[in-house]
């Protein structure tokens, strides 16, 4: 079980004035600012849960996961993972957990995948019989056989990620942290990876904490989500209830013909939320009980030349995007 109480992580950042003079000045007199990457968060995760830990870029997800793994020491607050305080007992904690961190590898670059697994067997002191049974199962579900004799550096991104996942589960940890496990992969590999994670949870009761920007991962793996924004927990609850609560939300993304200032047509002022991005991109979010998609489009067409538009449906993707835009 994972228990997180008033957990914070503040980074001290050196402030530099612009230019060479600024850089030289900062060598002698340092000015610091504090970034509250994680700010007094609380949650408990029970054994066997599969939780999506989501938020926009820079929200504080990786910082939290690193504290749970014991890589970072919190500035304030408490964490226990199966009764262990991770940063105090990093090695004991490591026996309990598995992790996949985007670009980093825990496989050995120059040797064949099978030999990497053999090394991990010794590092984690996995009994031979258990090791063989896991390898047989992972090989089948993740289709690893053709990859076993290939050196890791020769694997494609998708092949490597399949091998990484097997490595993370090899010592049968009770908790696995997965940071963007499907990023940049094709649909077929994504399907295989999601299937493997679900299977591990079903067969071994592994607790899974998943951070991802791919909402399809969340839909297919997690029953519960924790949404984090600017270091604070914005939502913690079931995926189902957030869908019921926000199921009427729609977002329309417009690409305007001309870039520059954007002003929302006044007729929609109290009915929608909007955000304006680069290159004339406007996103308008609304409840379909307040205004229809047809009305939003027609109001926009009267005020702007529209190059393109897409209507997002009420899948979790839209709901989460809407929450990022306007809060809960
Ligand atoms: N070592 C560091 N020093 C200073 N600031 C940091 C450091 N690591 C992260 N930050 C800042 O802390 C905030 C949270 O970063 P974090 O990496 O936890 O976000 P994230 O939610 O994982 O984002 P992403 O989805 O982009 O991976 C960001 O504003 C980031 O710039």
Image: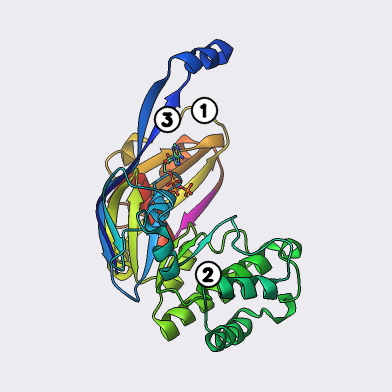
Question: What residue would you read off at disc 1?
Answer: 260
What predominant SS class does the magenta segment belong to?
Answer: strand
Identify the mark nearer the N-term, 3 or 1. 3
Q: Residue at x 29, y 45 (%)?
A: 8
Up-down: is 22 above or below 230? above
- Is the CB atom of the residue marked by disc 3 within 8 angstroms of ligand 1's nearest atom? yes
Q: Disc 3 on helix, strand or loop?
A: strand
Q: Secondary structure at mark 2?
A: helix
Residue 75 image-quadrant placement: top left
At label 3, counting other C-alpha atoms closer than 10 Å, the crowd grade (few under 14, some 14-19, many 20 or more) is few
Q: Is residue 311 magenta?
A: yes
Residue 245 percent coordinates (x, y): 26, 63
Instruction: For the residues labelled 3 and 1, say whether their Cβ atoms are less than 8 Å apart.
Output: no
Q: Which residues are magenta?
A: 309-313
Q: Nearer the viewer, residue 70 or 243?
A: 70
- Residue 189 located left or right of residue 323: right
Q: Position of residue 323 (x, y in %)?
A: 34, 51
Is residue 73 something that shows in the picture?
yes
Residue holding disc 2: 168
Task: Indicate the secondary structure of the residue bearing disc 1.
Answer: loop
The residue wearing badge 3 is 13
Left-right relation of 289 to 322: left
Task: Identify the residue shown where x is 59% and y is 86%.
Answer: 132
């Amino acid at each position: 079980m994972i228990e997180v109480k008033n957990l914070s992580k503040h980074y001290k950042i050196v402030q530099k004035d612009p230019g060479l003079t600024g850089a030289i000045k900062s060598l002698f007199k340092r000015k610091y600012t504090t970034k509250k990457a994680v700010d007094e968060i609380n949650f408990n995760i029970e054994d066997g849960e599969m939780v999506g830990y989501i938020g926009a870029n820079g929200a504080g997800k990786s910082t939290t996961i690193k504290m749970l793994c014991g890589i970072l020491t919190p500035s304030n607050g408490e964490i226990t993972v199966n009764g262990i305080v991770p940063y105090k007992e990093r090695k004991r904690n490591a026996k309990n957990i598995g992790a996949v961190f985007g670009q980093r590898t825990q496989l050995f670059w120059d040797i064949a995948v099978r030999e990497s697994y053999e090394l991990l067997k010794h590092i984690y002191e996995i009994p031979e019989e258990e090791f063989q049974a896991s390898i047989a199962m992972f090989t089948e579900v993740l289709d690893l056989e053709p990859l076993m004799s290939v050196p890791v550096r020769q694997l494609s991104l998708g092949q490597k990620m399949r091998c990484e996942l097997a490595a993370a589960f090899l010592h049968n940890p009770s908790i696995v942290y997965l940071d963007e496990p499907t990023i940049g992969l094709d649909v077929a590999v994504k399907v295989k990876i999601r299937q493997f994670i679900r299977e591990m949870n079903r067969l071994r009761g592994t607790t899974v904490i998943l951070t991802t920007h791919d909402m399809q991962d969340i839909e297919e793996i997690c029953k519960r989500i924790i949404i984090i924004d600017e270091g604070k927990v914005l939502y913690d609850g079931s995926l189902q209830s957030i869908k019921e609560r926000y199921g009427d939300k729609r977002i329309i993304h417009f690409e305007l013909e001309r870039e520059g200032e954007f002003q929302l047509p006044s007729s929609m002022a109290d009915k929608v939320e909007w955000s304006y991005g680069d290159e004339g991109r406007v996103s308008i979010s609304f409840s379909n009980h307040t205004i229809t998609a047809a009305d939003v489009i027609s109001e926009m067409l009267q005020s702007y030349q529209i190059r393109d538009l897409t209507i997002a449906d009420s899948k979790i993707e839209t709901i989460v995007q809407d929450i990022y835009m306007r809060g809960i």
